[in-house]
Image (cartoon, rainbow, N blue to C red):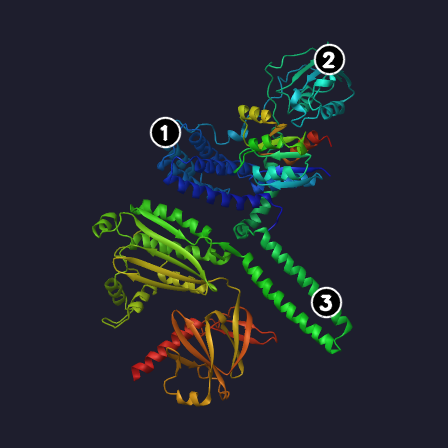
């Protein structure tokens, strides 16, 4: 079973993501901010990380930069799921090491499709 | 509530977000330049907007969008944070609360009015004028020029990924697989840029590919494959001919993954909506429990299961030998211990820090200060004191009223304060601390205090007391809790609103709590609330009077004494016993309850205390301590004084719970009558 880390400070958003991906047969691990996301990413290898951008304590960009330095997560796809749609921000995310960019609100089917695409499952 | 309903979770989360954001805004009024606070406010709104749109709270998302962009400007330093902006944003928070609670509420006009004020606070043209849902409609980008003529020529696709793309999680093999899924393909790898082995970094991508695809595939489908990398990579998609390299800097339309326009975000909403309507009311009633407390509960339940299996085993074999009986007794003790621990653990689960309750009053005081034109500081203390969630909720209204009273009647206007040598700003101190089985909450102000003359005049005018009647100071002050009492010369819209002090008192007593007032003219007033930690279970002392069993709340019991027959006879006249430093009046419950039985040879006196007064209760027998699950009395019996409730004993019998406060008052008044009679 594929294991997916979702990092978002909004509990309802995490729940929506979990429900969508649980249903598609993925194992979803939740983290409520960048710090927690990073520590989860240190502990176990994930097949995919889906993260918010604006979060307390450590934002998505800082977290990604840190995760990209972790040997354990080498090559792990990281997708931003955020309300931001600013091009400059996207570019910054890309250079920080983001694999892709999804905009909230999302539709469950769409998230599953993108997940499948990135995981190749 | 369902654990699987994101819309409902969002309601709870939104409530919490609004609370923290509001606190940050209130802090911001004192430190207008704090980046951290501005960030917190911005992030709160950002999440409200994002999650709101996700779960169908469209009006909320649209409204919040404007406030968010306003604070985005503040965050970026384009406009300064001002007291006016914070005040407007606070009213915007109230509006958001309405939109969270009632997404269909017809209040667009109020919203528009607030946004207008927001604009004014930012300077006229600062809020963007786009339609409310502009952000939600953000460019669902055309995936390309989109006007490819239908053709039967096959596609030729050339692509080269950025070298670091593999490290960033893009897997070129997956892209090729996806292209293959579109139809019969021919793939050629272009390897001319692969460096020599000794300088080759294996996580870099140096290969480019030429791919031939069937003519029936659409351009959109092909671009869709490269959705995440399309704006960084070399990609040429052409019909027929020979694929050529393109420049990376060639302006390509951006393709982001947007919600499929055919399936609007509302698709999820319709099913969620029904569920959230059903349970909208229960949203505020969930309790957040720290995981370690649940762990403790789990341990206890685990132990209970083990004891249960021991009991089952014993029951199967039958209790015949002395050893079996010993084993049974040990199980019984174990169950008793576990039941106690489970009760305590369970009670702790319901406990929440009082900080959340106190937090609401900061806003209240902020608004009251603006309304009255007084300058008021709210000081809070003991916010980590924990209290039952239900109790905390029911305390909100009474405390709101007490704070209103303090701000409106208690605190003087600034000139009057300065004239009497006080600081210009009035102070309201709200503090909480736990003592034994109860929580003490005090609301203190440094205002003018309660005028005894005015209380007396008012009480006489309302025929609560006889003109000129002698009253002790505390009796006089207690009059403010009488129904219909108000000392304000004129009722302002603050203190005249809603309930009186009598309702406050009733609410507190409904929580089995007590309310006390003390006041020093010119210095201020202190209202003390004593609230029991929980409502459902108490430790009680089980006693027998005549043929009936009664429970005395253990928290009120000071000590138990023996009343010998001689002493009983000797004290018949005055009903007082000598207890170390003083005399304590006592009540013979047998007489009070008119049991018609003869007293036991060795009666007991249980000394109880309430409100600083002590009395003794004479009972026939003390049975022992008892875990008392409180059941309320039926409406028929509720008006009987002396009893606060009932409980069911282990043998199925019923025991009445004695109302300590009533009994102490009764004992004291009887004693005073006796004393008056000489």
| Mark 2 Cα-neighbour bin, 10 Å: few <14, some 14–19, many ≥20 | few
Among numbered discs 1 and 3, the one appearing first in the sequence? 1
Which quadrant, please, contains the C terminus of chain B? bottom left
Among numbered discs 2 and 1, the one appearing first in the sequence? 1
- B77 vs B379: above or below: above
Q: Is residue A103 visible?
A: no
Q: Position of residue B400 (x, y in %)?
A: 39, 54
- Check if mark 1's residue and mark 3's residue have beta carbons within 8 Å: no
Front-lying residue, B304 or B390: B304
Q: Position of residue B180 (x, y in %)?
A: 76, 23
| Mark 1 Cα-neighbour bin, 10 Å: few <14, some 14–19, many ≥20 | few
Front-lying residue, B576 or B485: B576
The residue at the far top in this view is B241
- Check if mark 2's residue and mark 1's residue have beta carbons within 8 Å: no
Provide the chain ID for the residue under circle 2: B
> Label 3, on which residue?
B310
Disc 2 to disc 3, how far (Cα)? 76 Å
Q: Secondary structure at mark 1?
A: loop
Q: Position of residue B34 (x, y in %)?
A: 41, 36
Disc 1 to disc 3, how far (Cα)? 75 Å
Disc 2 to disc 1, how far (Cα)? 59 Å
> Label 2, on which residue?
B192
Q: Position of residue B375 (x, y in %)?
A: 30, 46
- B542 vs B156: above or below: below
Q: Is residue A71 visible?
A: yes
In the image, B568: left or right of A37?
left
């Amino acid at each position: 079973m594929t294991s997916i880390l979702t990092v978002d400070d909004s509990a309802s958003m995490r729940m929506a993501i979990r429900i969508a991906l649980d249903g598609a047969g993925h194992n979803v691990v939740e983290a409520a901010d960048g710090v927690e996301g990073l520590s989860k990413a240190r502990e176990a290898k994930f097949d995919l990380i889906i993260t918010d951008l604006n979060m307390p304590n450590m934002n998505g960009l800082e977290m990604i930069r840190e995760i990209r330095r972790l040997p354990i997560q080498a090559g792990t796809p990281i997708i931003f799921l955020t309300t931001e749609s600013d091009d400059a921000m996207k570019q910054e995310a890309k250079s920080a090491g983001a694999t892709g960019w999804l905009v909230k609100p999302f539709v469950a089917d769409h998230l599953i499709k993108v997940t499948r695409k990135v995981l190749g499952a | 509530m369902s654990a699987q309903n994101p819309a409902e979770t969002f309601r709870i989360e939104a409530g919490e977000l609004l609370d923290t954001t509001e606190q940050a805004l209130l802090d911001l009024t004192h430190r207008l330049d704090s980046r951290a606070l501005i960030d917190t406010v911005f992030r709160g709104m950002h999440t409200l907007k994002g999650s709101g749109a996700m779960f169908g709270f469209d009006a909320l998302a649209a409204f919040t969008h404007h406030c968010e962009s306003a604070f985005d400007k503040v965050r970026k330093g384009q406009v300064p944070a001002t007291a006016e902006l914070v005040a407007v944003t606070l009213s915007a928070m109230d509006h958001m609360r309405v939109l969270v609670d009632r997404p269909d509420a017809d209040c667009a006009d109020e919203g528009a009015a607030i946004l207008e004020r927001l604009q004014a606070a930012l300077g006229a043209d600062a809020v963007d004028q786009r339609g409310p849902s502009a952000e939600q409609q953000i460019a669902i980008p055309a995936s390309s020029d989109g006007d490819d003529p239908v053709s039967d020529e096959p596609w030729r696709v050339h692509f080269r990924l950025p070298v670091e793309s593999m490290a960033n999680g893009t897997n070129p093999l997956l892209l090729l697989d996806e292209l293959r899924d579109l139809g019969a393909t021919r793939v050629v790898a272009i390897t001319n840029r692969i460096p020599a082995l000794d300088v080759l970094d294996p996580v870099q991508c140096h290969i480019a590919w030429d791919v031939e695809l069937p003519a029936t595939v659409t351009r959109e489908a092909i671009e869709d494959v490269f959705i995440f990398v399309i704006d960084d990579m070399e990609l040429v998609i052409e019909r027929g001919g020979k694929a050529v390299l393109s420049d990376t800097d060639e302006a390509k339309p951006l393709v982001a993954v947007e919600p499929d326009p055919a399936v609007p975000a509302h698709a999820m909403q319709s099913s969620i909506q029904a569920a959230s309507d059903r349970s909208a009311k229960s949203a505020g009633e969930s309790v957040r429990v720290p995981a370690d407390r649940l762990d403790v509960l789990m341990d206890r339940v685990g132990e209970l299961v083990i004891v249960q299996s021991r009991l089952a085993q014993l029951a199967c074999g039958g209790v015949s030998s002395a050893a079996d009986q010993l084993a049974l007794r040990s199980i019984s003790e174990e169950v008793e211990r576990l039941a106690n621990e489970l009760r305590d653990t369970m009670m702790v689960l319901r406990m929440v820090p009082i900080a959340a309750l106190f937090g609401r009053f900061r806003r209240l005081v902020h608004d009251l200060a603006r309304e009255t034109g007084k300058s008021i500081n709210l000081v809070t203390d003991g916010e980590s004191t924990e209290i039952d969630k239900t109790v905390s909720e029911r305390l909100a209204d009474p405390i709101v009223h007490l704070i209103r009273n303090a701000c409106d009647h208690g605190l003087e206007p600034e000139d009057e304060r300065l004239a009497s040598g006080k600081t210009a700003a009035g102070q309201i101190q709200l503090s909480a601390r736990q003592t034994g089985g109860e929580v003490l909450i005090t609301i203190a102000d440094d205002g003018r205090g309660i005028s005894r003359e005015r209380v007396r005049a008012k009480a006489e005018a309302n025929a609560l007391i006889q003109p000129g009647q002698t009253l002790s100071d505390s009796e006089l002050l207690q009059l403010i809790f009488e129904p219909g009492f108000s000392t304000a010369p004129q009722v302002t819209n603050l203190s005249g609103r809603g309930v009186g002090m009598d309702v406050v008192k009733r609410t507190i007593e409904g929580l089995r709590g007590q309310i006390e007032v003390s006041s020093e003219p010119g210095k201020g007033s202190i209202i003390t609330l004593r609230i029991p930690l929980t409502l459902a279970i108490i430790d009680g002392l089980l006693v027998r009077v005549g043929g009936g069993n009664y429970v005395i709340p253990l928290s009120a019991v000071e000590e138990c004494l023996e009343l010998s027959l001689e002493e009983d006879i000797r004290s018949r006249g005055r009903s007082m016993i000598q207890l170390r430093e003083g005399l304590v009046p006592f009540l013979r419950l047998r007489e009070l309850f008119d049991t018609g039985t003869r007293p036991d040879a060795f009666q007991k006196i249980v000394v109880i205390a309430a409100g600083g007064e002590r009395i003794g209760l004479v009972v026939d027998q003390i049975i022992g301590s008892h875990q008392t699950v409180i059941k309320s009395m039926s409406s028929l019996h509720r008006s009987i004084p002396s009893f606060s409730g009932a409980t069911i004993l282990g043998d199925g019998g019923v025991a009445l719970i004695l109302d300590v406060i009533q009994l102490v008052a009764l004992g004291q008044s009887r004693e005073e009558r006796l004393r008056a009679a000489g």
